[in-house]
Image (spheres, grey):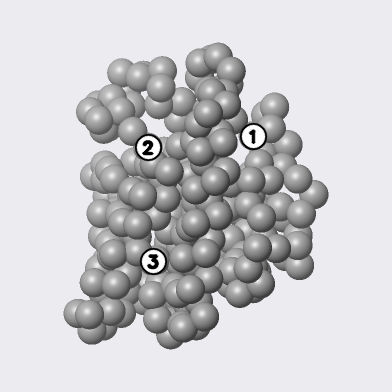
Amino acid sequence: MIRLFHVPLSPFCRKVRLCLAEKRLEVELVEERYWERDPDFMRRNPAGKVPVLRIDDMHLAESTPICEYLEERYPAPPLMPKDIDGRYEVRRLVAWFDDKFHSEVTANLLYERVNRKLMKGGYPVSANVKSGAKAVKYHLDYMAWLLERRRWLAGDAMTLADFAAAAHLSSLDYISDVDWNRHEVVKDWYAKIKSRPAFRSLLADQVPGFPPPSHYADLDF
């Protein structure tokens, strides 16, 4: 049995969950309050972060290496292009969302609104929330620019880049922080990926104290 130590709204955990589901791998999900630094969890990953994937008595950490490990071990269906230029573009966009989007948007919206409360860290910092609300518009504009030129974010096929973007945006959508009316092409892209069987477990997530909006699990918004 594959076991994933995760937090439901973590975009990094969600990216791994999407990869596992797309490759039809059965997995046991174990919620981990990593901020409590449980000794057992720290032995699994001394960095004290989720996700951590247990497979064949190994504990794998860091979402992108985990996803690429799964891609190499379970190559069907593929989530990376065969050509070197295509793989570069996927990796570039994964880094964009997991680095730039994460620091400018996810950390300022999701972490302020949800994580602070879960970790008993006080009230959201309004300046951070305002910064995140402003930055997400820029990122949606960039996604629209890409999708007006490609079927998917990195090219003509769905890849890990789409899962990375959808992982962050779905976490924000859970707290109604995405303006889907800003770009129809981005909304259509999300509707396509949201409708995939791999997305079902994400749409079923429930975080105590933070009920999702009515449109969150609606495939037609």
Q: Residue 207 carries which label?
A: 1
Q: How far apart are marks 2 and 1 (CA)?
A: 17 Å
Query: Which quadrant: the C terminus?
Result: bottom right
Q: Where is residue 25 in the image (x, y as percent from the top left)?
A: 44, 61
| Labelled pair 2, 1 in contact (Cβ < 8 Å) | no
Q: Residues within 10 Å of mark 2 (few under 14, many from 20)?
A: many
Q: Which of marks 3 and 2 is in front?
A: 3
Position of 216 relative to 8 (above/below):
below
Residue underneath mark 2: 50
The residue type indicated by label 1 comes to: Val
- Secondary structure at numbered mark 1: loop
Position of 99 relative to 188 (above/below):
above
Q: Where is residue 149 in the image (x, y as percent from the top left)?
A: 46, 83
The residue type indicated by label 2 comes to: Val
Q: Observer-nearest residue: 94 or 5? A: 94
Question: Can residue 27 be seen from the camera position used here?
Answer: no
Position of 140 relative to 43 (above/below):
below
The residue type indicated by label 3 comes to: Leu
Please give the name of the residue rendered at 24% of the width and 72% of the height, measured from the top-left corner.
Answer: 88
The answer to which of marks 1 and 3 sits earlier in the sequence is 3
Q: Where is residue 113 in the image (x, y as percent from the top left)?
A: 59, 30
- Secondary structure at numbered mark 2: loop
Residue underneath mark 3: 160
In the rendered structure, the answer to whether residue 148 lies left or right of residue 65 reads: right
Q: Distance between the residues labelled 1 and 3?
A: 25 Å
Please give the name of the residue rendered at 28% of the width and 79% of the height, measured from the top-left corner.
Answer: 86
Position of 35 relative to 5 (above/below):
above
In the rendered structure, the answer to whether residue 113 lies left or right of residue 5 reads: right
The answer to which of marks 3 and 2 sits earlier in the sequence is 2
Q: How far apart are marks 3 and 2 (CA)?
A: 18 Å
Q: How crowded is mark 3: few (under 14 residues within 10 Å), some or many (20 or more)?
A: many
Question: Can residue 46 be seen from the camera position used here?
Answer: yes
